[in-house]
Each structure stands twice: as C-alpha cells, then as structure tokens.
Image (cartoon, grey):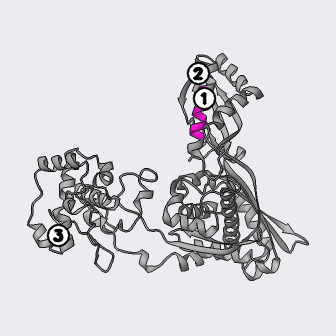
Amino acid sequence: CQTEVESGGPAGRVDKPVQTDGSVEQVSRHDRAVQTGDLQEEEEVHPRPLEECVAIYKEKGSAGSLCDAEVRALVRASYIPTYQIEKAVGDPERGVGIRRQIVGQSGDFTDALTQLPYRNYDYSKVLGACCENVIGYVPMPVGVAGPLLLDGRLVHVPLATTEGCLVASTNRGTRALLQCGVSSRVVADGMTRGPVVRFPSMTRASEAMLWMQTPENFQTMKDSFDSTSRYARLTKLHVRIAGRLLFIRFVATTGDAMGMNMLSKGTEMSLKTVQQHFSDMEVLSLSGNFCSDKKPAAVNWIEGRGKSVVCEAVVPGHIVTSVLKTSVSALIDVNISKNMIGSAVAGSIGGFNAHAANIVTAIFIATGQDPAQVVSSSNCMTLMEPWGEGEDLYISCTMPSIEIGTVGGGTQLPAQAACLDMLGVKGPNETCPGENANMLARIVCGTVLAGELSLMSALAAGHLVRSHLRHNRSSTNTAPTTSNFHPSRPSCTSS
C-alpha cells in the first residue's frame, strides 16, 4: 500500500498518518509500517486483491484492518458507501482522511486539500448530526467585542468573521454603551412550521379552516402536538386559504432548542389528528413556505418567528462626541435618511437597519447556529431620537424573528460550545427551560445595537471608508490566484 501522508501548513509540516485502534492481529500492513517507521517497506507492498479484501471485510464486519488503498478499492467497488467510510474503518478521522484521498484523486485537487485541515477534530459530534461526506473543517477567525453592559451584566461577545473592521467597530459600540448600558426584553417566543394541505374543493377547505379556528378543536390539535415533546408547546395557529389549499402556520415554544425538528414532529402528529375529522385532506408538504424558513418573508417581520427581542439605550451626548466622534443631531439625521427613508425606497422587508446581518451572522457562526437563518434573524428596525433636553441619544433595535437555540445542531461542537460557555448560555437551562436561548437572543440584539451605533456614527462622521481601508485591506489579502478552471474562450486584452 502507498503511504497516505498529507503535508499541511505553510511551513511544510507533515501530519502523522492515522493509526487504527484494532488489536495486534487487526493491524494492517500500512499501520504496522507507520508504527515501525519503515514506510519504505510498505511502499514496496501492493494492495491485496479485491476479493481478499472483500472476504476480510465481510468476515470481520469492519475494514479497520485494511490499509487505505484497500479501503478505497472497496469504496470504488461499491462494497462500502462513500458516506459510511468512518463506520466501516471504525475511526472517524481515518475515514475522513480516506474520503479526502478518494475525492482529491477523482477531482484532481489533492494538492488543494492539503490546505484544508482535518486532523485533531472530534468527528463523533459531527457524524449523523451536522454534516455528511466530511472532508475536513474550515477554521474561522473569532474576535471578541465587549464587554457589553446588557441588563446590568457584562458580556464578552465572540464574533466569527472574515470582514475586517466589523469586530473593531462593534467593540467601539460596546465601549460607547458601557456608561449607560443596554436594556433588553424578549417580547414574544414562537418557532413556526407552515404545512400546506389540499382538499377536494374550496368548500371543504373553508370548513376545515373554521374547524381549526374553534377553541375546542385547537385544543385537540394542541394535545396531539404537545404529546410529541417534553418542551414543544403549541401556542397558536394562523390559517390562510388559497382556493382549495390551506396554509397552516403552527407556532410553538421549544425550550432552549431553535426548534425546527420539534415543530416538524409536532405538526405531523397534529395533522394526523385533523385527518381523523377530514379524511379527504391531503398533506402536500410539511413545509408550505408559510413558516417561513430561510427566505425573505413579510410574515416573519410582521408576526415574528423564534424570539422577538427589543433593546434600548440612552447614550449621553458627551459619549457621542468623545467616543463616536459625531453629534446626536447628525446621527438622527443619517438614521432617518438611511435606515427609514432609504430602506423604504428600496422596498425593504425588515431591513430598516445599517448592518444587523453582519453581527447576527458573526454570532451565529461562533455559537453553532444555522447561518442560513440569518435571512430572517437579521430583520431589524433601528430607531434613534433625541433624549432629555436633546443633548442625549435614545437608540433602540427591534428584532422580531431571531431563530436561535443553545442545544442541538452545531451548538454541541467543541469550539461553538466554548463560545456559548463564554456567554454563560451553554446547553439547556435546567431550572427554567428556554431561558438560555432567550438570553442568547437578547445578547444578539444588544450586540446588534452596539454595531448599529458604531457604524451609523462612522457614516455620520464620514469615517467609514477610512476605517475599512485601515482594517480590511491588508496586503496579505492579495495572494496569487490559483485555479484549475481554464475557460475555452480567450480572455480579452486591454487595448
């Protein structure tokens, strides 16, 4: 078997080959060569015939005793599915390494993969939960903004981003808020799932709609829904009719989980209860886009989805002048012109802010949330007005649809769990289920407020371009481009 060793890092560091953890009898020729350091001897040994490898695999029920080349042969011959390599060899990291070899060779980008790390990662938390066909992981820079004084508590906020100036700007916002602090409230809580069902006629659809809106029938549906989880609790239904179709928006609290899986399970059970009364009801899709998940939708902006949060602060005028380098009147003027009028001119839905999505995305990536849900989670209205005698600034951020959780999904990954731990919201809140997720949503909104305050100040003072040139234009960002793509059409030359 050929040695499967990958070089990594700019200094040409060589990763040590992964060893299997089988018994002495199960140690492959490849592994024995690694253990003894006699790689030359192993290079002279050819993989065993496919038939012999198949026999060993079937006899042992594992491919752990085979070398990498022999495992690759079994994959190519369809004895081992590509997505089950980790299970077949009994070693997640080795399985990922073998898949990298297969993918790299088939796509002719083995060299490119040497820059994608995969060693020293706990794949047991990934497999079957976060990702399939794993070939490595992408390291992300994580900065910290703060401390943010939120509801009397100092919070250091981790932000995972590759946008220069974002952390520095948000940090300036938290510094400006240290004296006054930020107050926050979760004013509504309800994850949603909106299936679409079809009836033989509009008449039957309207009858079912009226049936669901009756309090006693809603309670019947709620009992079915709630029976599927210890934490999910149905709170309301929004029913809309379109011809003979019904769109039913289930709204439920979900404890400390973001809750989509709970909603799907509960919704399915509740619809079965409805079918007992309307046997001619056809469930077309468990998601009919009335949820609405991972796409712009006015319903989330108006009705809310996940956590609906409001934050506010009163910033003293001297802080606006000394820290933010602008004036209260200039800030208010720019906020009205940009965030209110400008967003209206653009026909925005939920985009009455400067850059809420920047902060939401950075926190979501750092804490293991679903980045695709930034679409709705970054819905935000930033308001500013003079306070007191007009010398101070009142600022608020209203975010009606923060889709967030502290359990499940990527929150269990080590680095993401560490960031949640930094914030004091790791895992479920055993005393008051749901409180950790609520607190995280409040931190998101409070940090967005800090980011809004800083960016709007930079715009009002005319500092935006200068700060981005300083923080986001490093010479290291101009590395030579490499590409395996060669267009058939000749490139144009300047005349």
Q: Which residue is mark 1?
A: 271
Stretch of the chain drawn in magenta: 263-272
Residue at 9 percent of width and 63 percent of height: 45
**Residue positioned 37% across, 75% down in the render:** 479
State the CA–CA distance, disc 3 to disc 1: 59 Å
Label of residue 324 in the image: none
The residue positioned 55% from the left and 44% from the top of the image is 261
Foreground residue among 333 and 478: 478
**Which numbered disc, 1 or 2, marks the residue that appears first in the sequence?**
1
Q: CA distance from mark 1 to mark 2?
A: 9 Å
In front: mark 3 or mark 1?
Answer: 3
Provide residue 385's location: percent of width, then percent of height.
82, 65
N-terminal of the two: label 2 or label 3?
Answer: 3
Regarding residue 214, the answer to whether it shows in the image is no
Determine which residue is flagged by label 3.
33
The kind of residue tagged 3 is Ala
User: Is residue 257 something one can see in this rendering?
Assistant: yes
Q: Residue furthest right?
A: 389
Quarter of the picture containing the C terminus is bottom left
The picture quadrant where one finds residue 228 is top right
Whole-angstrom CA distance, mark 2 to mark 3, is: 64 Å
Instruction: Say whether marks 2 and 3 touch (CB < 8 Å).
Output: no
The image's mark for residue 281 is 2
Mark 1 belongs to which amino acid? Leu
Per the image, is 267 magenta?
yes
Q: Position of residue 259 (x, y in %)?
A: 60, 47
